[in-house]
Amino acid sequence: MKNTIHRFIHSDADIAVLRVSVIFIFALFGTFKWFDFEVAELEPLISSTWLSFLYTLFGVHGGSYFLGVVETLAFLALIVGFKKPALGVVGALVVIVTGITTLSLLPQLSTLDGFIVKDVLLIGAGVVLLKFDLRRQLNTPEASATGSAAPLATGR
C-alpha cells in the first residue's frame, strides 16, 4: 500500500485527471454552442454584456459558433498537450482567458449561477495546467513533494 501511495504521489496522474476534466467541460460546452438550445440560452446573457459585439460581427448564431470554435480549439490543444506541451500551454491559456472573459460579465449580469461559477474553477485548473506544461516545455525540474519548484540550473 505504501508503494502505491508513493508512486501516486510522484506521478502525474492528478494532472492527467485535471486535464481530462477540463477537456470534457470544454468539449461539452464547445459542442453545445453549435445547437439552437445553446444559442437561445446565450442570447440574453451575451446581448446584455460587452460581448454583444460578437452579435454585431457574426449575428446571434455566428456569435455562438465563434465561442464554440474557441472552446473547441482549447480542448483540442489540451488533448494534443498530453504529448506536445507547447500546445498544452496554448490550450491552458485559452482556458484561463475564457474563464476571465466569462467572469468579466458578472457586473453586467443580474444573477450569479453555474454559468459564471464554473469559470472560477476553470481559471484555477488552467493555471495548474499552464504551469505543468510550461515546465515540460522548458524542461524544468518538477516540483518537490512540498510543492515548491526545484531551482533551475544556471551557468550553462
Image (tube, rainbow, N blue to C red):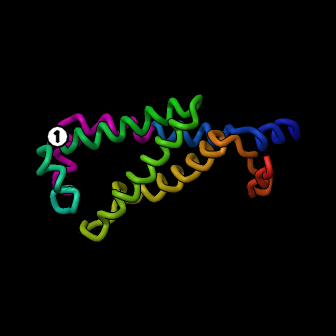
Is residue 23 shown left or right of residue 8?
left
Q: Residue at x 79, y 52 (%)?
A: 154
154 or 37: nearer the eye?
154
Name above or below for residue 120 compared with residue 139. below
Q: Main secondary structure of the magenta part?
A: helix
Q: Quadrant of the N terminus?
A: top right
Q: In terms of image quadrants, where is residue 140?
A: top right
Look at the image and give the residue range highlighted in magenta. 24-45
What kind of residue is marked 1? Answer: Gly
Name above or below for residue 107 compared with residue 92. below
Q: In terms of image quadrants, where is residue 67?
A: top left
Residue 93's x, y, as percent? 47, 48
Residue 43 is covered by the magenta coloring? yes
Is residue 58 shown left or right of residue 26?
left
Q: Which residue is mark 1?
A: 62
Disc 1, SS: helix
Residue 87's x, y, as percent? 50, 36
Q: Residue at x 61, y 37 (%)?
A: 16
